[in-house]
């Protein structure tokens, strides 16, 4: 069931009531929606943090309409972030992921004491501007995304959790915190953490995450918490047996294919027969792995269909891509 916690939310409610309640809440109200093992929220500090990171990296994102002193304050906060973190991707900087965890628990009116002083100063200065320019629109978009995603998770979430759990050689994460944000890295989403507690950042404004694709995005991101290393290790073992180099990023292509196919099936069972998985729709295979899609169809699809074992599927994939 959907469980919502916070200052203004409570109880188990259906999708359409949830959608209406999201818009009835004041913009700054705390909100966390728990359904099918996912905890979805729109958090002020995490959104500000991601916007500052995006500004440092000059990622395409609607600019805040600022001028004069406000622009000076905002630019100073961006420079503070640039000095602290540089342009290193958030996923590969443990300082950023630790900060994201801390901010994810914070109420809008205060910062955790553990936030380093220089970073806290940048956030507090930027907050003076963001509260008046950007946050209301970002929060509205995030809450709408959460309402749509929660409705689909309520209906298909447990089914998809079971399906994913049967595919990968590691346990499905026991808990997945999802911070829904305006910006979430250069590709619109990323995840860190472990099987015990995964933490995903998913952009509500990224076109590839919207609509029915929100469901795939949630399960793709959660898969990263446990499946990455296990798949990569198994692929290396098969490559060593064959005396070849492991196909680069094959583990990631498998995650794309798996969540895309399992989501497509779940939606098709509910009457949505034209869903195109993210990596095909967004041209990920064509750009990054032009040989992988056909190999996955020929060698991984039978495993998803129950016609081969995991070991057989990985061995055949490595052989096909040697």
Image: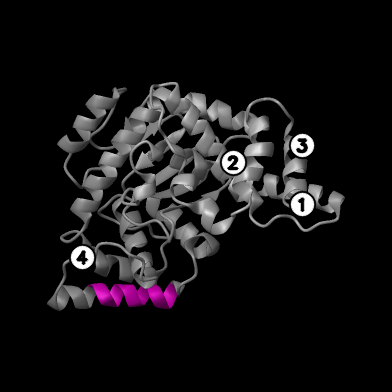
Compute the Cα span from label 1 to label 3. 12 Å
Which circle marks residue 64 in the picture? 4
Question: Mark 4: which secondary structure?
Answer: loop
* Front of the two marks 2 and 4: 4
Comes first in the chain, label 3 or label 2: 2
Q: How crowded is mark 3: few (under 14 residues within 10 Å), some or many (20 or more)?
A: few
Which circle marks residue 236 in the picture? 1
Estimate the x, y position of residue 201 in percent, counting from the top left. Answer: 42, 50
* Front of the two marks 3 and 2: 3
Q: How crowded is mark 2: few (under 14 residues within 10 Å), some or many (20 or more)?
A: some
List the residue tagged with mark 3: 311
Question: Mark 1: which secondary structure?
Answer: helix
Question: Mark 3: which secondary structure?
Answer: helix
Residue for point 54% across, 51% down? 285
Q: Which quadrant of the rendered structure holds the N terminus?
A: top left
List the residue tagged with mark 2: 195
Is the Cβ of the residue at disc 3 closer than 8 Å to that at disc 2? Answer: no
Comes first in the chain, label 2 or label 1: 2
**Left or right position of 76 against 236:** left
Quarter-wise, where is residue 183 in the image?
bottom left
* Front of the two marks 1 and 4: 1
Where are the magenta residues, as a range?
A: 74-84
Estimate the x, y position of residue 88 in percent, counting from the top left. Answer: 49, 70
Compute the Cα span from label 1 to label 4. 46 Å
Compute the Cα span from label 4 to label 3. 50 Å
Is the Cβ of the residue at disc 4 closer than 8 Å to that at disc 3? Answer: no
């Amino acid at each position: 069931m959907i469980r919502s916690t916070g200052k203004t939310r409570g109880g188990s409610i259906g999708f359409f009531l949830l959608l209406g309640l999201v818009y009835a809440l004041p913009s700054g109200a705390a909100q966390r929606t728990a359904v099918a093992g996912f905890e979805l929220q729109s958090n002020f500090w995490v959104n500000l943090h991601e916007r500052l990171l995006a500004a440092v990296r000059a990622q395409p994102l609607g600019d805040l309409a600022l001028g004069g002193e406000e622009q000076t304050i905002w630019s100073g906060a961006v420079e503070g972030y640039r000095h602290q973190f540089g342009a290193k991707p958030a996923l590969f900087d443990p300082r950023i992921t630790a900060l994201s965890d801390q901010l994810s628990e914070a109420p809008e009116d205060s910062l955790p004491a553990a936030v380093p002083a220089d970073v806290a100063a940048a956030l507090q200065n930027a907050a003076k501007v963001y509260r008046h320019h950007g946050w209301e629109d970002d929060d509205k978009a995030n809450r709408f995304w959460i309402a749509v995603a929660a409705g689909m998770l309520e209906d298909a979430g447990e089914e998809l959790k079971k399906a994913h759990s049967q595919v990968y050689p590691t346990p499905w994460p026991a808990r997945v915190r999802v911070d829904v944000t305006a910006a979430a890295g250069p590709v619109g989403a990323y995840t860190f953490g472990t099987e015990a507690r995964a933490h995903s950042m998913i952009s509500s404004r990224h076109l590839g995450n919207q609509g029915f694709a929100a469901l795939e995005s949630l399960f793709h991101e959660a898969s990263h918490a446990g499946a990455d290393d296990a798949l990569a290790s198994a692929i290396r073992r098969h490559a060593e047996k064959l005396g070849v180099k492991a196909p680069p990023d094959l583990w990631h292509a498998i995650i794309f294919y798996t969540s895309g196919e399992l989501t497509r099936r779940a939606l098709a069972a509910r009457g949505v027969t034209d869903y195109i998985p993210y990596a095909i729709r967004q041209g990920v295979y064509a750009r990054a792995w032009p040989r992988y899609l056909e190999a996955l169809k020929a060698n991984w699809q039978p495993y998803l269909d129950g016609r081969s074992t995991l070991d057989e599927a990985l061995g055949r994939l490595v052989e096909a891509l040697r």
